[in-house]
């Protein structure tokens, strides 16, 4: 009876490496991910809503490449905030304020647990596929790639010279996306290498809560 060799977890991860704020997939595709703010469309006036729709339509019409809008939803984690309040309680010399702080901690903790509050993060994924690597990819695979690695995919590391050339092409697309979405009132921040690792780790380990800080809007490079 033939023995089936178990595959390592890394074989199921379509990422070859992450460097300089760019995700390099095993098929050679380069991806940049922008974290975006949201717009409360319902609170806008009719004229503002129409202007946003028109600007978004213009943005879509200006693209000659594919992008993906990705939403991440997860339960709100306030442990770090509660720890901060507990430290404040310990350092409080006024007994009345100490009691009020303790009661406030319990209120916030119970409220969040009973309400099951969710946080939502919005991302735009911009990709660039070098001419050397040509493969048909569906919209569903644009963020994570194929679940099963493609045997025919290129696994060799992109040379530094080619990487700089491809990176320039990718960031030109990122600039186009940024300029188009800014006109709709959305702010964007490209994720750096550390933030990309954190994001993908959370995607591949959905059972573990994220504890890292979100990037500052409009200031990340």
Image (spheres, grey):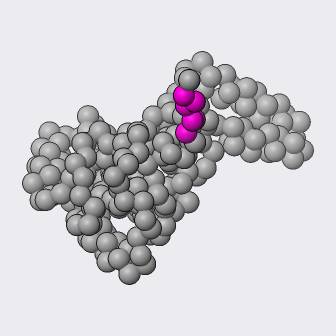
> Looking at the figure, which quarter contains the N terminus?
top right
Q: From the viewer's perspective, is residue 96 above or below residue 143?
A: above
* Quadrant of the rendered image containing residue 180: bottom left
Q: Position of residue 141 (x, y in %)?
A: 32, 42
Q: Is 18 displayed left or right of 93 in the figure?
A: left
> Does the segment drawn in magenta span residue 3?
yes
* Quadrant of the rendered image containing residue 188: bottom left
Q: Position of residue 177 (x, y in %)?
A: 25, 60
Q: Position of residue 63 (x, y in %)?
A: 15, 58
At a point 61% along the width and 37% down the height, the residue shown is 209
Asked whether 14 or 110 is in front, the reply is: 14
The answer to whether residue 18 shows anywhere in this view is yes
The answer to whether residue 34 shows anywhere in this view is no
At a point 68% along the width and 42% down the height, the residue shown is 81
Question: Residues in magenta?
Answer: 2-7
Q: Position of residue 197 (x, y in %)?
A: 54, 54
Please name the predominant secondary structure of the magenta segment in the image.
loop
Q: From the viewer's perspective, is residue 165 above or below residue 91?
A: below
Residue ranking furthest to the front? 1
């Amino acid at each position: 009876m033939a023995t089936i060799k178990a595959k390592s977890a890394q074989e199921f991860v379509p990422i070859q490496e992450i460097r300089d704020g760019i995700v390099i997939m095993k098929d050679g595709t380069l991806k940049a991910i922008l974290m975006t703010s949201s717009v409360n469309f319902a609170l806008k006036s009719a004229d503002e809503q129409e202007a946003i729709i028109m600007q978004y339509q213009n943005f879509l019409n200006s693209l000659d490449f594919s992008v993906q809008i990705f939403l991440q939803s997860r339960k709100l984690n306030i442990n770090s905030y509660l720890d901060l309040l507990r430290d404040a309680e310990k350092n409080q010399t006024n007994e009345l304020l100490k009691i009020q702080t303790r009661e406030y901690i319990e209120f916030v903790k119970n409220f969040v647990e009973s309400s099951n509050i969710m946080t939502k993060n919005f991302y735009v994924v911009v990709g660039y596929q070098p001419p050397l690597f040509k493969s048909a990819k569906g919209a569903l695979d644009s963020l994570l790639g194929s679940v099963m690695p493609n045997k025919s995919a290129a696994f060799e590391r992109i040379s530094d010279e080619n990487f700089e050339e491809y990176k320039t092409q990718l960031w030109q697309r990122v600039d186009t996306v940024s300029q188009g979405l800014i006109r709709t009132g959305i702010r964007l921040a490209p994720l750096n290498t550390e933030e990309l690792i954190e994001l993908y780790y959370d995607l591949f380990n959905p059972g573990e809560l994220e504890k890292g800080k979100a990037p500052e809007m409009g200031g990340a490079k």
